[in-house]
């Protein structure tokens, strides 16, 4: 892929930071700092040159091992510091909790490279996770390197599991308060890859909440803040948050059936075997200003799933994904920049940049309600060709598509409803022919720009399924180049033009639409969580396009926006 695409992603991620989000986070952590200042605190030091018989209370008398740290009974407000540049092999088990006013912190001291915590492969076998946390909360982990490339079997540990940081909530109590930041997590792989794709749970960072067995024991995990981390090379996920659903009638679908208030901000993922982010059973999830590079990588192919979108959501409520960039996703299925799997409600996807993801430009599966997809730029997505040999040694049955709204759900297919796709820009690569499929109820496709570059086509096959009385609403879209006549014919007021775009451009504004192409006024769909909690900076009605221009609500520019206005 052109290096310029990465530059565009980097600029997009940093230029579009949201002032309201910064204010919210700053106020929160200043409050925590002031509240915790009166709590007695102990700082412990750990160095590979230390001795576990030391008291660990100074840089001159540090402990040596992770096992010594794991044995200590830490109190709220305590800090454990690992010496920069040192290597610590084994497993760190965190068995104590902090408080909201005084979390327990794990970080580093000294200048130089971040200390490396490596689970290693000891004689008794490899640990399942480098950092293991079970039923503990109010924790801060920062400024560390984490590695766990498992190569030796261990009794009681499945060979298919491997985690950098694993945080489990077994259901004993509600857990809350986690901040994971400025970590470098690299090479997290299992001994063996599981055959069934969905049973592969390998993750750089993983939160796992068990389902409630009774109404009285219903609990969740909340207030998770993961930011400014770099995660490279894992068998599947970078970050996975999963609250497994309860079968108990009085719990199913209630707030305690979901993990709440999850913020994943300004992280970088590279060369993961699967996806960077999974939100599964989350209510109130914010995915903002992250960069996903080469999801579905074939690095260490024998222990990787080699398939993945940059991020995806499953069985979740109130999700916002904005200002993210996803480049180079690969795999025989899915493998979009970002996709909405099945069983979600109230999902807002806006202001994202997708480039060279072979699956789909927009992917929304079945059994969803109220998905809003607006002001995104998709360049070169949907190039996958079905029924040909692939690098990973299989053939795909799933051709790439510019737009893919599917009824796929389990245990049976069920169309999604209230799907709003508007003011996006889709640009193809030369020599590609992505299809278009729309199979949902109350689907609206308005004010989008579809630009087929020379030697490419949009809509090599077009399937629009009639699921309700009115059918899908397709109106005021812009079509340039070889776009399927069948798709254009479905548009109530099509705009036809010839626009030239350079898909190797190094500026996001290269994909701006001229301001003289205006679409229809949009009655914006509701997003009830806007302006509340982690979404305090989100507005239900978008004020600006992806380039930062004010939107003329009565006559918005078609596509994701026009070139930035002069200052």
Image (cartoon, grey):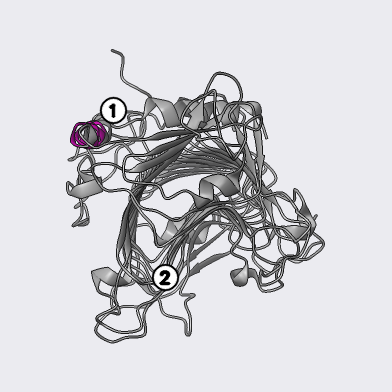
Q: Is residue 328 left or right of residue 17?
A: right
Q: Which residue is mark 2?
A: 170
Of residue 200 and residue 327, the one placed in the foreground of this image is 200
Asked if one can make out residue 510 in the rendered structure from this viewpoint, the answer is no
Q: Position of residue 379 (x, y in %)?
A: 54, 41
Q: Quadrant of the N terminus?
A: top right
Q: Position of residue 106 (x, y in %)?
A: 46, 39
Q: Secondary structure at mark 2?
A: loop
Of residue 283 and residue 353, the one placed in the foreground of this image is 283
Mainly helix, strand or loop, the magenta region?
Answer: helix
Taking 76 as reference, is 303 above or below it? below
Query: Is the residue marked by circle 2 packed among few (<14), some (14-19), or many (20+) residues within 10 Å?
Result: some
Marking on residue 549: 1
Taking 563 as reference, is 43 above or below it? below
Indicate whether residue 184 is drawn in magenta. no
Residue, x 63% and y 26% (percent of image)? 85
Q: Position of residue 88 (x, y in %)?
A: 65, 39
Magenta residues, start to end: 26-35
Measured Cα–Cα span from mark 1 to mark 2: 47 Å
């Amino acid at each position: 892929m052109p290096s310029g695409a990465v530059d565009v992603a980097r600029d997009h991620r940093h230029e579009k930071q949201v002032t309201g989000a910064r204010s919210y986070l700053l106020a929160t952590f200043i409050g925590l700092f002031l509240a915790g200042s009166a709590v007695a605190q102990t700082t412990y030091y750990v160095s590979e040159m230390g001795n576990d018989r030391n008291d660990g209370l100074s840089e001159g008398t540090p402990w040596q091992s992770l096992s010594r740290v794991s044995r200590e009974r830490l109190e709220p407000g305590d800090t454990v510091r690992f010496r920069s540049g040192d290597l610590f092999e084994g497993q760190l088990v965190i068995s104590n909790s902090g408080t909201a006013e005084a979390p327990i912190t794990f970080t580093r001291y000294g200048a130089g490279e971040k200390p490396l915590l490596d689970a290693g492969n000891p004689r008794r076998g490899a640990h399942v996770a480098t950092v293991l946390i079970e039923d503990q909360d109010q924790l801060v982990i920062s400024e560390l390197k984490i590695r766990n490339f498992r190569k030796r079997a261990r009794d009681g540990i499945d060979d298919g599991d491997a985690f950098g940081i694993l945080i489990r909530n077994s259901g004993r109590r509600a857990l809350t308060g986690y901040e994971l930041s400025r970590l470098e997590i690299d090479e997290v792989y299992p001994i063996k890859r599981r055959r069934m794709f969905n049973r592969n749970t390998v993750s750089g960072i993983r939160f796992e909440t068990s389902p409630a067995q009774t109404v009285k024991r219903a609990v969740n995990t909340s207030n998770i803040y993961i930011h400014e981390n770099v995660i490279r090379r894992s068998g599947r996920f970078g970050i996975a948050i999963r609250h497994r659903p309860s079968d108990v009638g009085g719990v199913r679908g209630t707030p305690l059936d979901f993990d709440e208030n999850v913020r994943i901000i300004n992280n970088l993922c590279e060369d993961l075997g699967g996806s960077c982010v999974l939100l599964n059973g989350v209510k109130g999830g914010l995915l903002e200003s992250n960069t996903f590079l080469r999801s579905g990588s074939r690095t260490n192919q024998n222990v990787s799933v080699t398939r993945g979108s940059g991020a995806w959501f499953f069985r979740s409520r109130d999700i916002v994904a904005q200002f993210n960039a996803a480049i180079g996703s690969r795999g025989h299925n899915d493998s979009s920049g970002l996709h909405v799997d099945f069983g979600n409600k109230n999902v807002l996807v806006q202001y994202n940049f997708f480039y060279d993801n072979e699956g789909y430009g927009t992917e929304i599966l079945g059994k969803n309600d109220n998905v809003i997809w607006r002001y995104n730029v998709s360049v070169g997505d949907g190039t996958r060709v079905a029924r040909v040999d692939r690098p990973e040694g299989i053939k795909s049955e799933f051709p790439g598509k510019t737009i893919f709204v599917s009824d796929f759900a389990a245990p049976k297919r069920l169309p999604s409803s209230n799907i709003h796709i508007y003011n996006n820009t889709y640009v193809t690569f030369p020599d590609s022919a992505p299809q278009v499929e729309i199979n949902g109820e109350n689907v609206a496709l308005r004010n989008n720009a579809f630009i087929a570059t020379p030697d490419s086509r949009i809509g090599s096959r077009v399937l629009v399924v009639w699921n309700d009385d009115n059918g899908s609403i397709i109106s005021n879209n812009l079509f340039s180049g070889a776009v399927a006549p069948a798709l254009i014919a479905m548009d109530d007021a099509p705009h036809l033009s010839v626009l030239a775009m350079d898909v190797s451009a190094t500026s996001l504004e290269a994909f701006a639409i001229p301001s003289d192409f205006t679409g229809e006024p949009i009655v914006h769909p509701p997003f009830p969580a806007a302006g509340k909690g982690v979404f305090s900076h989100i507005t239900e009605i978008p004020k600006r396009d992806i380039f930062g221009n004010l939107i003329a609500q009565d006559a918005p520019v078609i596509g994701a926006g026009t070139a930035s206005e002069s200052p």
